Amino acid sequence: MAQNPYNTDLDRNPANFQPLTPLTFLERAASVFPDHTAIIHGALRRSYAAFYARSRQLASALAQAGIGRGDTVSAMLANTPAMLECHYGVPMCGAVLHSINTRLDPAIIALQLDHATARVVIVDREFMPLMRQALALASVAPLVIQYDDPEYDAPEAPTDVQDYDDFVATGDPAFAWLMPTDEWDAISINYTSGTTGDPKGVVSHHRGAYLLAQGNALTTSMQKHAVYLWTLPMFHCNGWCFPWTMSAIVGTHVCLRQVRAEPIWAALADLGVTHLCGAPIVMSLMISAPDAEKRDLGRTVQFFTAAAPPPESLLAEMKTAGFDVTHLYGLTETYGPSIVNDWHESWSTLPAAQQAALKARQGVRYLPLEQVDVLDPETLQPVPRDGLTMGEVMFRGNVVMKGYFRNPKATAEAFAGGWFHSGDLGVMHPDGYLQLKDRSKDIIISGGENISSIEVEEALYRHPAVAVVAVVAMPHDKWGETPCAFVELVAGQTADADELRTWCRTHLAAYKVPGKFVFMAVPRTSTGKIQKFFLRAEAQKYSS
């Protein structure tokens, strides 16, 4: 093959090639709009100049503590300024950010800390008791730093650990932060719900974060200086990369420690919020709020939701209240949502029921995602575009993870055949829009939280009266869906729903406890495999 003449004597060099990283977004915002408000949190107003300086101070303080390239810094924080600073300051010293779901139980937190080999843990004071339990179970012994949020009004408890603001103050605000040596370098690690027994630490890189952060702005039509309300937990896939997006468009973060209706409506009305994200439960919370808490916005606000499609009635109420709702889809392995239900103007004239059906579809790829398709998992060939034939949803592109940390087997399986296998089952409609139909991994999405049915089953199997159990998703008016446990008892043993519910509460995080227990002979095939397809259909008869 002849050599490409355009590659001759035209090499990469510092003048024409720099690693892509979202960290440069903050540097640019601070240099061009230093006085623009970057963060609002209660009475706090922090400019981009101050945000950049504090992030550099954090990076400097971590470097002075011996943290460098490839080290892991874990953060267990609410949606606060400290969490935003971690998204910049941690990678600015070359380290990798590990955001911890604040709703997990101590055993799983300990498992994550050990698997990620955490060197530093930054913890909100509210979650310090939980973290202490986790550290007592963990093998690692990280430096522990406590963040004392002024918006957390619980009585202050004595602590023997380093204070976050004091720690940051030891750093240099002019610290010469580190660019990644390669844009393929890890920027974060986030754990999937299937951490029990086989940790799945999803490793994201600077390049992917850079691209998806900009993809967010394009997908959501975010204008310069947009105002974003943090109703989505930042521990979810790094807040879907929005901590970095907002610096790219020099927008304003409105932090929200707790997702409650009154402060949401107040922020929408008083702070000019233009965009927010969240599961359907957030919409339900807002719409069901007392009239005294609701506010007349007088404008349209963009709301982006994932998880189970919201019901038609909720979409109608959100529209009346002034919100344009867009459905997204993605996974931790794709930096959060990378599929959007791009709306056609002509659809807006259709009957409400038809619009709701269209909105229930997951949609088409983000601009930074090169390919998504529904393929036959055996042949890797596309299924017919008929909206009926199911296959596995698969991805290719620059916003797909590096792989699973310290798990080459799972990584190889996930990337078999040159595609990322999502494990989700769906159909492709004739117009190229994707719609999910089932989850081959049996992950239940409740209020935006992923619940592993296997983990719930394992907890129930430890009860002496349980012989066979199968857990599937059941419709839930508030949470979208919740676990439903089908239980077959040991001959001669007794147990009722209240007893098993109490048992689960002692072994699982509260949101993972089944909403309903059905006692029956669990159906199995001739080979003994549980027929979950039958149970899923059965669970549709129930709700809670």
Image (cartoon, grey):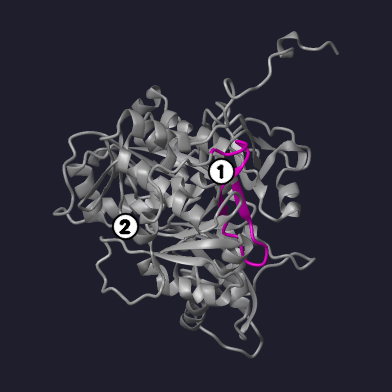
Which residue occupies 31% across, 43% down? 50
The kind of residue tagged 1 is: Leu
Decide if residue 182 is in sight here: yes
Q: Nearer the viewer, residue 102 or 389?
A: 102
Give the image quarter of residue 28: top left
State which region is magenta: 179-203
Q: Nearer the viewer, mark 2 or mark 1?
A: 2
Label 2 neighbourhood size at 10 Å, few (<14), some (14-19), many (20+)?
Answer: many
Q: Which mark is residue 465?
A: none
Which residue occupies 26% across, 35% down? 36
Counting from the top left corner in percent of width and height, residue 542 is at 47, 63
Decide if residue 341 is in sight here: no
Image side of residue 442 versus residue 278, left or right: right
Counting from the top left corner in percent of width and height, residue 171 is at 41, 52
Image side of residue 344 versus residue 395, left or right: left
- The residue under label 2 is 257
Label 1 neighbourhood size at 10 Å, few (<14), some (14-19), many (20+)?
Answer: many
Tell me the element at label 1: strand
- Magenta: main secondary structure equals loop
Asked if residue 393 is positioned above or below residue 486 in the image, the reply reads above
The kind of residue tagged 2 is: Arg
Counting from the top left corner in percent of width and height, residue 107 is at 56, 72
Could you give the CA–CA distance between mark 2 and mark 1, rounded to whole angstroms?
A: 32 Å
Counting from the top left corner in percent of width and height, residue 337 is at 50, 41
Give the image quarter of residue 392: top right
Q: Which mark is residue 436?
A: 1
Asked if residue 407 is positioned above or below residue 5 in the image, the reply reads below
Q: Is residue 188 magenta?
A: yes
Give the image quarter of residue 315: top left
